[in-house]
Image (cartoon, rainbow, N blue to C red):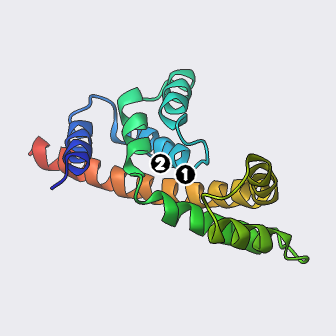
Amino acid sequence: MTVAWRQLLARLRALLHLDDPPQRIALALAVGVFISCTPLLGLQTLLAIVVATVFRLNRAATVTGVWINLPWFAPVVYGAALTLGGWILPDPGGVRDAWLAYFLSRPFGLRWQDFMVLLQELSAALLVGTTLVGLGAALVTYVVAFGLISARRRYHEK
């Protein structure tokens, strides 16, 4: 098992021992998962700490939620987000698809100006898509985490 998986599993086990009620832990974890789906790579952990502090959520649970979206899941998350965003915000002229094809055909030969145009073309679809993917992932996370934490606590109360 890789180090990243071990660290993540250790963080998830630690969540089971927090003193907060199960619904607060599940909410903090779900908020972290939502943040992990945003396109703000590199800022997600910091954003999780700020959001957790402002809304008085458990910071450890929120950061753990961010870390659930491991780097090798990111292409799947952002690919799904772009697809979903593309369905909601259609591109009748095909500009977005043309730029994306251009980028994929020469990822290392792309000039900075080209990258900025590509980002501008994809940003609205990506924002809508990541919001929806993040909401779905957060909802599933809340339901699963609340169920598991509640069940574990009931088991240990016996």
Identity of the amino acid at label 1?
Cys
Above or below, comparing residue 14 to residue 93 in the picture: above
Q: Which dot, 1 or 2, sits closer to the camera?
A: 1
Residue 43 point in image, percent of width and height: 55, 34
Q: How many marks?
A: 2
The residue under the point 40% across, 58% down is 72
Categorize mark 2 by other alpha carbons within 10 Å: few (<14), some (14-19), many (20+): many
Residue 118 point in image, percent of width and height: 77, 57
Residue 5 point in image, percent of width and height: 23, 51
Please indicate whether residue 97 sits to the left or right of residue 57 in the image: right
Identity of the amino acid at label 2?
Val
Q: Is residue 66 visible?
A: yes
The residue under the point 54% across, 48% down is 34
Q: Report the front residue among 64 and 39.
A: 39
Please indicate whether residue 106 sits to the left or right of residue 26 in the image: right
**Kind of element beneath mark 1:** loop
| Residue 37's disc number | 1
Residue designated by label 2:
33
| Residue 18's disc number | none
Furthest toward the right, the residue is: 93
Q: Report the front residue among 93 and 64.
A: 93
The residue under the point 25% across, 39% down is 11
Q: Report the front residue among 137 and 20.
A: 137
